[in-house]
Amino acid sequence: MPHLRSIQRILISSLACSVQLSIAIEQKDTVKSNARALRNRASDATQYGEIDVTGFPSCAIANCITSNQLSPSRLGCSGTPQLNKDCLCNKAPTPLSCVPSGPSDEENCWYEAEDWFAGACSGAVAEVKSSTIPQCMQDCVYAQIATMGCHNPTRNCFCILDRKPLLEATSSCLENCAKKMRSSFSPEAWRNDICKLGETDDYDQEEYDKYIKMVHDTRIAVPVVVVLFWLLFVTFSIICCRNGVVPQAVWTLIVATVLGLAIILPVEFAL
């Protein structure tokens, strides 16, 4: 009898485990079915607010449309009840930030999303303007952005790039510029304004050009003035030599030369 009761307990326990396993599998299948149904409904949808989402890349539907990440409130368009073209194409700083992957040679989802966005916005796609950065680093910055995977310097692609490598690359490009410019341009502030506010002010290139002209004029004027004074000292030394005061003439030349170099060299290296 004890053996029969043990066998009964084992059978009952096994049956309970089987029932629990069946329930868990059924719940998991239900969750998958619901998620699949949501994706299918999103895939079948042709409108999201006022935007035609026909052709929206299937790889990003769950992240952008099903998850409601393209809603005006998520995009930062206050007072807009439904997604419209003005919100998607103009007001939202980074409307494609919901796409699950960024630009790369191995993944096409990002490029499909960019193509869809360009079509939805009739080709009016915001780009990172060259006027927002100093001229001396423009070519370098755009080359770095392309190397990181952006076929075009669109704001969408620029802002989805990894922040740290982007700032490091931009800072290295800034090394091509004069010292004065390095202190007047902040790569981090530039990137933050573009990706959080949607735009940033143009770099004041005119002010920098004025500075460069001042440096150029100073580097010419200072040596000219120093040379003129040095010639006066040379003339004085010659007069001293003719009057027999040779030591004084030599010291005058030495002092004139040292003073001239002490004035010219700091000006050349400081500016």
Image: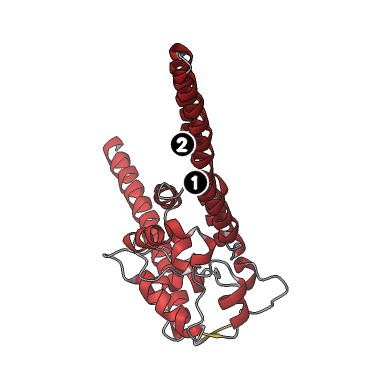
Residue type indicated by callout 1: Ile
Residue type indicated by callout 2: Phe
- Picture colour scheme: secondary structure
Task: For marks 1 and 2, give the CA distance.
Answer: 13 Å
Which residue is tagged 2? 269
| Disc 1: CA contacts within 10 A as few (<14), some (14-19) or many (>=20) | few
Q: Which mark is residue 220?
A: 1
Q: Residue 83 carries which label?
A: none
Spot occupied by residue 232 in the image (x, y as percentages of width and height): 52, 31
Q: In this view, does 59 lie above or below 228?
A: below
136, 67: nearer the viewer: 136
Residue drawn at x 60%, y 68% as measured from the top left: 75
Spot occupied by residue 223 in the image (x, y as percentages of width and height): 49, 39
Sequence-wise, the earlier of marks 1 and 2 is: 1
Q: Which residue lies furthest to the front in this view?
A: 243
Residue drawn at x 46%, y 81% as measured from the top left: 118
Residue drawn at x 59%, y 76% as measured from the top left: 90
Spot occupied by residue 82 in the image (x, y as percentages of width and height): 65, 79
- Identify the secondary structure beneath mark 2: helix
271, 150: nearer the viewer: 271
Q: Is residue 211 above or below residue 28?
A: above
108, 229: nearer the viewer: 229
Which of pointers 1 and 2 indicates the residue nearer the eye?
A: 1
